[in-house]
Amino acid sequence: MTYSLAGRIQTRIVLFGVIGGIWTALVTPILPTRLPLGSSYEMSFTVLGLIIVLGVAWELAYHLLQQFRWDKDWPTGFSLLAGVPEGLVLWLLLDSGTWLWEVPVTARGFWTLFISTWLLIWAVLSGPIRVLLVRRRWRGGRLFG
Amino acid sequence: MTAAGPFVARTGDLTRKLLDADIWSEQLLFEAGIPIADAPMVCVGGGLGTFALVDHLRICGVRPESLQVLTPLSAPWESFAYLTRVSQISRGDRLRSDSSSCPDNLWGFPSFAVREAFGADTVRGSLRPLWQVLTEPICGEHYTPRLGEVLDALAREARRIRYPEMVTQGQVRMVRRREAGGYFTVLTPPERATGARRIAFRSAHVHLAVGYAGLRFLPELAAYRASTRNSSRVVSAYEPHEHVYDQLRRRPGTVMVRGSGIVAARVVHRLIEERNAHGLQTRVVHLLSHDVPGPQGPRFMRRNGGDGFAYQAFDEPKAVWGGQLRDRAGATEGAGRVEFYDSLGGPSTPYRKDWHAQLATARAQGWYSTVAGEVEALDPQSDDLISARIQARDSVLMAQVSFVVDCTGLQPDIGEQRILADLLHHSNAGRNPLGGLDVDPSFEVRGTRSGKGRLYASGAATHGGYLAGEDTFLGLQIAAQEIADDLAAQGFCARLDVSRSVRQWVRWAANRPI
């Protein structure tokens, strides 16, 4: 995908917000969190929110790296692999209690949610998004403007 | 509406009055005896550029009766198939095209890699294209589809949208603005057709996708062919030249290949394959206009290169079709546009490991060499040889060769194309900073609006516009989408919104005719 910076940020917010939000709402009750349902939802939506908020900063870094690529392309493999550093940083933040407030988090619950959400969004971005948003790929990933 | 035969009342031809008038009326045509046929939209060209737009408009709900394709071609892929064939790409060979560049599918989903995976007979055959597309271009070369697959997909989509029903065959002579708005497009039916000598199609809108004017012969090549009246020794890679390979099988010789793009790479590949398969003694002198010893360009626009070639996966850097480079091109005018196109660099070829290995072997064995320079003159010698005088960077070289295969391209000058030349003279059309047809961001030809009617153009003729990579599968589809959006804004068709897109994609996936 040949992203523009605005396209990256819009894609991050809207796809994780909408598709990630629906997925998180559906999958949370069956996540192996060993927490009460309310706490599970607190964990899962905090994780999703942080994927979006911290993701904007990650997108700035990816955009900078993209400038070193001759064709200004961001290969699909990069989009998939980006989940590794993002997932690790997020886990360290939450598990070590470094994040601004205490979030109930368990490793199995966190990783099941993170990996499944990441793969789902990546799969949607790899093809079906082009049917839903037919002009997006010609506009650097922008959904608006 | 199909062939305009039934409408014909009398036969007629273009009159001086018609030829001189910039704007026509029905009265002028009546006086000349040229019959008029009606169609809301006329598409001139009939190649892949036309197909991309017709496909888009049909998906946006335009009925076949509202579209009239005027073309000498019998199928939209005819020219494309011809050019690939003569430039040494067979049905089983892979094109230089991205997996999601699908001329039969405006969504690019499922991509060709996914389709190949689903169509494979073995697990390995299924996994290979998927793995390649997942790891490209870091762990290997880009996935590219086979020519045969693309042609089959095009044929399937043409049937699905009932493309043949919209075609009237013949040569388009000109498009002129109509006094009361819209346009007249004059068609010369094939010789064999009975009825009128010319037919004028009256339409609200016109789309031109007429491709290149023809082959481009550089002056010294044209001079050699004219002076010797022999066109078999100095050939263009874009014309049939199978005799070169045939004769080299019978008699050893040296071939000078000229050009540094993908076609030159294919011709060299064919010569090497022939040499290996038949034990020939062919020698190859590869003449490159610029020497590319290694990667070139500033840090943020650095293109890979080496051994004389600039390497890039596709015709243009990928972002020209829909990323940062498209945004950048869209913001340029005048000299800034020229500078932008210059920054994209000259001809290139994809880095392919097997081909690179072949060249290394050929170089080591001493029968393949590259020279950076320009041909100054070609002179006939005895025994069917040609003497080539080459101006290299700091010396003049002489080479004796049996054949020259010129791979430097097709004629890009729109002034050499009859319909476009007429448009420049009579319809207020102009040229963009690179000399191509000046179109606005929605691909409307600037200056040619006629009442509520609009005249659009896409493809090779618009080179130098706001979209680089205009003459590619993706470029033609992007243009089609911009034109369809513009027409939708005028109420000509429905806009391709989420709901229509999903419904139409499902129909496409089920191969249901529309």
Image: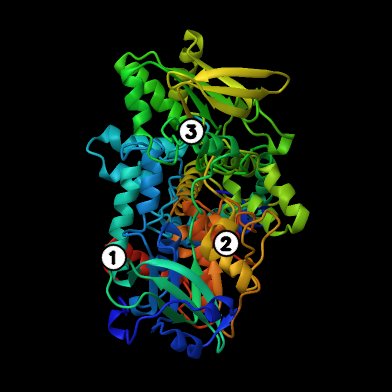
| Most foreground residue, B502 or B456 | B456
Estimate the spatial distance between the alpha carbons at disc 2 and disc 3, rounded to whole Å. 67 Å
CB under 8 Å between discs 1 and 3:
no
Residue at 72% in and 53% down: B337
| Most foreground residue, A21 or B331 | B331
Badge 1 amino acid: Arg
Q: Which mark is residue B228?
A: 3
Residue under label 1: B160
Residue under label 2: A14
Horizontal and vertical percent position of residue A3: 61, 51
Q: Is residue A49 visible?
A: no
| Most foreground residue, B465 or B417 | B417
Secondary element at image label 1: helix
Badge 2 amino acid: Val
Badge 3 amino acid: Thr
Q: Which mark is residue B329?
A: none
Query: Taking B373 as reference, is B95 left or right?
Result: left
Estimate the spatial distance between the alpha carbons at disc 1 and disc 2, rounded to whole Å. 34 Å
In this rendering, the answer to whether B238 lies above or below B379 is: below
Horizontal and vertical percent position of residue B120: 26, 40
